[in-house]
Amino acid sequence: MMATRGIILMNLGSPDSTEVKDVRKYLLEFLMDGRVIDYPYLARLLLVGGIIAPLRAPKSAEAYKKVWTKEGSPLVVLTKQLQQALQPFVAAPVEIAMRYGNPSMQQAYDNLLAKVPDLEEVIAIPLYPHYAMSSYETAVEHAKAVHAKNKYTFKLDFVKPFYSEPNYIHALAESIQPHLQQEYDQILFSYHGLPQRHMKKADPTGCHCLKVDNCCEVASPAHATCYRHQCWTTTQLIAGALQIPKEKVGFSFQSRLGREEWLKPYTAKRLEELPGEGVKKLIILCPAFVSDCLETLEEIAMEGKEEFLHAGGESYTVIPCLNTNPLWVNALTAWMNDYANGSTTMLL
């Protein structure tokens, strides 16, 4: 890869510490994003600043304390480890940036410029397999805004959502395979949840998402920006690759916030219901994330396990995210090296 190019791995972010003040600051930045909570600004300010951040910060701080490492936040630490794992396989320098918190997008740009003063192009890789306005889209738009504000002269490109890309599917399938050797009743694919309103808002046709029976299975231009369809597609591809019987595949959405309708079924509810349906031995994974974080390590691995076993479950196996899995590093390497050789297949 040419020396005048740089790579940035973009992830969601974390508080700087488990102190309540740092968690509150992080929640304010995160939830005040108009693509996360898409209410008018004043309504969002009253809701987030007056209710959500003050109430959630102490609870979230306690949750972060359960998963925090000596090096810091698992999400940031694992993203740094991915950067270190990828760097030997690509010629361009690799930096990391968080959408919220640190290191910031500007820090990543400036770090690349310090390493490559004649920087001509940056390839940003949003580490979200699936498109959603509250994850992939906001990361891309934020990167563009920081780029424009600082009047950087280098070109900026993005890797597109990779929910069905063969190298990614292969890496994910191979990470799951060893866990299927044990006896299990169901493997539950738990994706991060979104308000149903977001699905309809992201539908360019205005008449497909959540309006057509089996909308995820009926071909539509809406699928290019449909988070639910893309999650469903990943599940189908993995189940097919591993030849998992249809009756053993579960599909749900976690991390609901507020009282409005979110994508269903809800993971927390399914974990309470499954033992009563005869699912006593459960395997669960969270393919919306490529790096383990609060939502996987605390919400699913700790709280979820407690809910499932309390409801009568017998065994509960959590499959880690891809993190620094060599096949995942291979996938990123292939995309970057293919691009260096002239292919734009993986670009947005």
Image: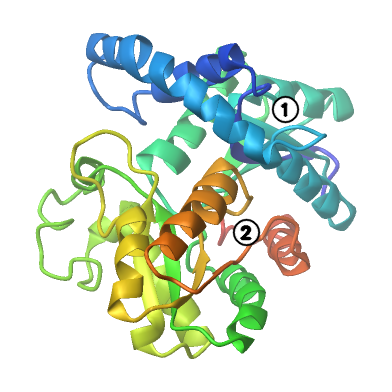
What residue do we see at 70% from left, 55% from top?
323
Residue of label 2: 321
The amino acid pointed to by label 2 is Cys
The amino acid pointed to by label 1 is Ala
Q: Position of residue 327 (x, y in %)?
A: 73, 69
Residue of label 1: 108
Q: Is residue 275 left or right of residue 316?
A: left
Q: Is residue 181 above or below residue 86?
A: below
Label 1 sits on a secondary structure element that is helix
What residue do we see at 23% from left, 22% from top?
39
Image quadrant in which you'd find residue 20: top right
What residue do we see at 39% from left, 44% from top?
255
Kindly identify which numbered label has been placed on residue 304. none
Q: Is residue 48 left or right of residue 27?
A: left
Label 2 sits on a secondary structure element that is loop
Q: Position of residue 17 (x, y in %)?
A: 68, 22
| Distance between the alpha carbons at the discs numbered 1 and 2 | 24 Å
The residue closer to the viewer here, 328 or 13, is: 13
Q: Is residue 32 above or below residue 304?
A: above
